[in-house]
């Protein structure tokens, strides 16, 4: 029997079919204490202590004779095992015969409910303290009988199915899902920390992704608007012009190429062999041009700490040479 209990405690949790099982989850002081202990710093030890304390109390069913309905329940079991009860109606008649009341009244009686809760709590306590199990078989059997009476009181039509009543005497006992399996202190702390860390990381990554996506969209929109800057938006005093040296160099080059020519043959012959080298020129925008930017572009520039009326935009400016005015000889 101890091996069975150990198996129940350590096997992986599985969801039982409630239609073919009996749950021992109840609203009791003992089960509330167990749930509280499960969240303690040392859950296994605290739960074991609570279970041991319950076993030492008067509520624990050490003897089935301590149950209020012990005698009729014992008779009820004996009558069911002979196989003469085969449907819901026959079951209801038997309950009235043995308990003196209809199933719905019996199942709603305070003493019956108290018996049921004591049985449920005692089964859980034995699972937690395997050495305390002299009446486990009797507790489980009686708890199943209570469940059968409740089903009869609820007019459970499935009891009319062939063999349903006999199967109800072998129904699986299901332990509270919120209580089992019981984690160790290390497992609980590790699981909680891991879950919190993972949740925090996912949340932070999600927020960061959203922020980056918003910034990328805002930056792309700002770039599109900046690409639409016009020539007239720049401060005219900043615009580059040809230097005197460049003009003289061009004039000398043009004169050499035109020397000895009797007529103008091809305009390309009088152009310099190369244009003036591109120069990188810093330009600033007019205040009114910046004011025309939409709020998004202004926000992007503010975040980048760029005042385009003061911080120059470095652009490449090509200065093509002027075509000279040459008269034919």
Image: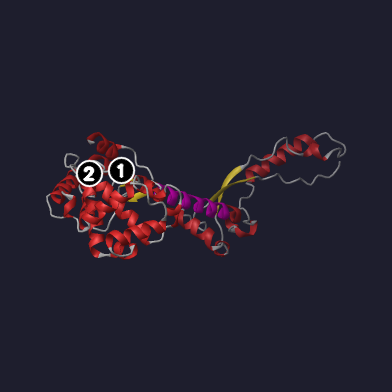
Q: Nearer the viewer, mark 2 or mark 1?
A: 2
User: Picture quarter containing residue 262?
Assistant: top right
What is the secondary structure assignment of the residue under circle 2? Answer: helix
Horizontal side of residue 193 vs 208, given as left or right = left
Q: Is residue 134 above or below residue 297?
A: above
Looking at the image, residue 41 lies above or below residue 98: above
Residue 170 seen in the current view: yes
**Residue at the disc numbered 1:** 191
Which residue is drawn at the image coordinates 39% and 48% (left, top)?
20
Q: Residue 80 location in percent, x, y?
A: 33, 50
Q: Label 2 to label 1, Cα distance in Å?
A: 33 Å
Residue 215 in the magenta stretch? The answer is: yes
- Residue placed most toward the observer, 184 or 320: 184
Q: Quadrant of residue 93?
A: bottom left
User: What colour scheme was applied to this rendering of the protein?
Assistant: secondary structure
State the image coordinates of residue 31 (x, y, percent, origin top left): 23, 54
First in sequence: mark 2 or mark 1? 2
The residue depicted at 80 percent of the width and 35 percent of the height is: 259
Any mark on residue 136, and which?
A: 2
CA neighbours of label 2 inside 10 A, class few (<14), some (14 to 19), many (20+): some
Residue 156 drawn in magenta: no
Residue 60 appearing in the image:
no
- Tell me the chief SS of the magenta region: helix
Residue that appears at 34% across and 38% down: 12
Q: Residue at x 32, y 54 (%)?
A: 147
Residue 176 rendering spot, x and y as whole percentages? 30, 50
Count how many numbered circles sit on residues in the image. 2
Q: Which residues are magenta?
A: 202-222
Q: Secondary structure at mark 1?
A: helix
């Amino acid at each position: 029997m101890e091996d069975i209990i150990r198996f129940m405690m350590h096997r992986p949790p599985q969801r039982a079919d409630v239609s073919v099982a009996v749950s021992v989850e109840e609203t009791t002081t003992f089960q509330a204490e167990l749930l509280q202990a499960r969240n303690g710093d040392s859950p296994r030890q605290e739960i074991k202590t609570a279970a041991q304390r319950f076993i030492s109390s008067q509520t624990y069913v050490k003897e089935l004779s301590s149950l209020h309905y012990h005698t009729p329940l014992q008779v009820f079991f004996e009558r069911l095992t002979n196989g003469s009860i085969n449907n819901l109606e026959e079951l209801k008649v038997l309950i009235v015969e043995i308990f003196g009341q209809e199933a719905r009244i019996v199942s709603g009686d305070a003493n019956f409910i108290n018996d049921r809760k004591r049985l449920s709590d005692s089964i859980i306590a034995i699972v937690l303290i395997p050495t305390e199990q002299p009446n486990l078989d009797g507790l489980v059997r009686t708890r199943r009988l209570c469940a059968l009476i409740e089903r009869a009181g609820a007019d459970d039509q499935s009891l009319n199915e062939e063999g349903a009543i006999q199967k109800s005497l072998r129904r699986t006992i299901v332990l509270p899902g919120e209580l089992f399996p019981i984690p160790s202190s290390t497992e609980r702390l590790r699981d909680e920390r891991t879950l919190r860390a993972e949740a925090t990381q996912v949340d932070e990554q999600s927020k960061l992704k959203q922020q980056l996506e918003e910034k990328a969209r805002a930056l792309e929109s700002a770039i599109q608007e900046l690409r639409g800057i016009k020539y007239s938006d720049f401060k005219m005093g900043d615009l580059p012009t040809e230097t005197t040296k460049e003009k003289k160099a061009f004039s000398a080059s043009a004169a050499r190429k035109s020397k000895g020519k009797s007529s103008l043959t091809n305009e390309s012959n009088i152009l310099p062999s190369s244009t003036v080298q591109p120069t990188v020129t810093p330009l600033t925008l007019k205040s009114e041009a910046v004011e025309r930017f939409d709020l998004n572009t202004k926000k992007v520039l503010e975040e980048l700490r760029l005042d385009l009326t003061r911080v120059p935009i470095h652009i490449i400016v090509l200065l093509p040479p002027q075509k000279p005015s040459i008269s034919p000889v």
